Amino acid sequence: MKAAVVYGKNDIRVEDYPTPKAGSGEITVKIKASGICATDVKTLLGQGLPKELPTILGHEVVGEIYEMGEGVKGFNLGERVAVYPIAVCGECYYCKNGHHNLCLKEFGLGHGINGGFAEYVKLPAQIINIGGVIKIPDELSYEKAVIAEPLSCGIAALRKNRVKPGDRVVIVGSGPMGLIHLKVSKWAGATVIMADVLDKRLKIAKQMGADYCINVSEANLEEELRKITGGTGAEVVITSLGIPKVIEDSYRLVRNGGILNIFGGPPAGQPITLDPRWVHYGEITITGSFASTPDDFKKALELIASGEIIVEDMISDRFTLDNMLDAVERAKNQDMIKGIVLFK
Ligand SMILES: [Zn+2]
Ligand SMILES: [Zn+2]
């Protein structure tokens, strides 16, 4: 098969690679579409390599079942499926309580095992056994279904942040995941305030239904928010970018009794300073959300299939495996919202 194989820093080669074979309890999927995530872009840009090399990235995968190992039940060859990308033990405290993404032995597509930037991917039993291979309704296209994974992360954040109709939600960072937060927050009935430094990003957010778009290089977000909220601040503030300084500054946007969510993955070793009086006297909740659970994933797929959340406007770029490294240039210029790699 053909695959985009990561050998090292700035060393990714599109080349022939052994096609995986489904062993006992495993499934191989012939991939139809793979989404390119911010984490993938970081690695493609040469920042933060996976531990074991060579490897194949890509954790947003849809395709058809190509091969089933011994003992796999409930699926048919050729069936159209979306893949929850996290493999878990199924036995630890977290798995038993439905918090699969927090599993102590968690690994998954593109981290620990080969992922979706290839013609085929092998899914371990640890994904299949937790219901991580989900059938795609006939009428739903692969292009739309591939957004289920990022959307599920937005659904997970929504759940953690307990967003209610009428809440004011500030989303700091209007990149691809910021726009996903916008979509799920609007679906939940919130008023959404998007912040970014790039007008082109905010323009897209406006088109996608943002109520307010604030360019923080021109305006003072805190002051603008006070005007919008009558002085209180927002019920929920999501930091959708992993910049510690921005997270540190975002607390000023939260109203008393509100929630600050740390969504974007911050780099290691860069602590922030927080006034405990703010948390205590303001009765603030700080939440984290990382990836999603299989239930979030199923919910995301349902919302896409029913048309309750429109996702096709997320896809700005379509690549083949051969030209997918062009995504790096597009991402560098911040021109790409969401890129997907399509397969025949
Ligand atoms: Zn992703
Ligand atoms: Zn576990």
Image (cartoon, rainbow, N blue to C red):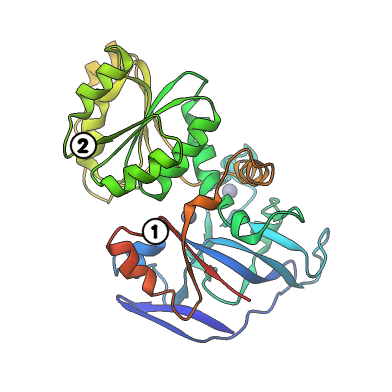
Q: Nearer the viewer, residue 236 or 224?
A: 224
The label shown at residue 341 is none
Q: Nearer the viewer, residue 125 or 160?
A: 160
The response on whether ligand 1 sits within 8 Å of label 1 is yes
Query: Which structural element holds mark 1?
Result: helix
Task: Identify the mark nearer the N-term, 2 or 1.
Answer: 1
- Say above or below: 173 vs 24: above
Query: Which structural element holds mark 2?
Result: loop
Residue 300 appears in view: yes
Residue at x 17%, y 40% (from the top left corner): 217
Q: Quadrant of the C terminus?
A: bottom right
Q: Which residue is mark 1?
A: 39
Residue at x 35%, y 42% (from the top left corner): 240
Would you say the residues marked 2 and 1 are in contact, meaning their CB atoms lie under 8 Å apart? no
**Residue 259 occupies which quadrant of the picture?**
top left
Q: Which residue is mark 2?
A: 216
Residue 212 lies left or right of residue 190; in this view the side is: left
Residue extending farthest to the bottom is: 16
- Say above or below: 11 vs 228: below
Residue 224 at x, y percent in the picture:
24, 24
Q: Nearer the viewer, residue 194 or 159?
A: 194
